Image (tube, rainbow, N blue to C red):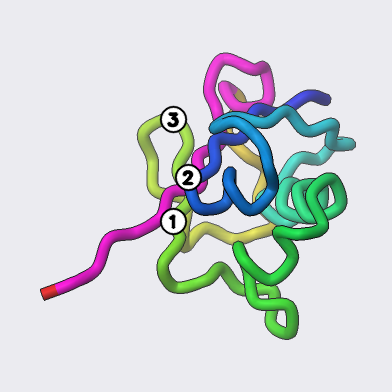
Amino acid sequence: MTIRVELPQHLCQLAGVRRQVELQIAVPVTQRTLLDALETAYPMLRGTVRDPATQRRRAFLRFFACQEDLSHADPDEELPARVLDGAETFIILGAIAGG
């Protein structure tokens, strides 16, 4: 299955890719399998999206799809149908912090 993933600019630069990449992922497609495929396709991104030891999302990154914040969703829950059928992208967004 082909899934489209939109990356924040700093990860695009690190991986040497454009804003959107396409990944081939076997079903079921979950956050975990998507991030595994992303790190396999772009090994330089290992440790940048999720902590290598805990596999948890990095604090300043958020996950969105179908106008929903999936950042705190179960990583083994299947992604929304519109992402699976290619109508929507899975978005990794760099959070903004400051005071």
Which quadrant of the figure contains the N terminus? top right
Q: CA distance from mark 1 to mark 2?
A: 14 Å
Q: Amino acid at mark 1?
A: Arg
Q: Amino acid at mark 2?
A: Gln
Residue ID for mark 2: 9
**Mark 2 or 3, which is nearer the eye?**
2
Q: Amino acid at mark 3?
A: Cys
Describe residue 45's horizontal placement relative to residue 26 as left or right: left
Q: CA distance from mark 3 to mark 1?
A: 14 Å
| 83 is higher (above) or lower (below) than 32 | above
Front-most of 7 and 82?
7
At x 57%, y 22%, the residue is 82
The stretch drawn in magenta includes residue 21: no
| 63 is higher (above) or lower (below) than 65 | below
**Based on the displayed image, in which of its 4 quarters is residue 99 positioned?**
bottom left
Magenta residues, start to end: 82-98
Q: Which secondary structure lies at badge 3?
A: loop
Describe residue 47's horizontal placement relative to residue 83 as left or right: right
At x 60%, y 27%, the residue is 83
Residue 73 drawn at (x, y percent): 52, 58
Q: CA distance from mark 2 to mark 3?
A: 20 Å
**Mark 1 or 2, which is nearer the eye?**
2
At x 59%, y 61%, the residue is 74
| 13 is higher (above) or lower (below) than 72 | above
Residue ID for mark 1: 62
At x 60%, y 31%, the residue is 18
Q: Which mark is residue 66?
A: 3
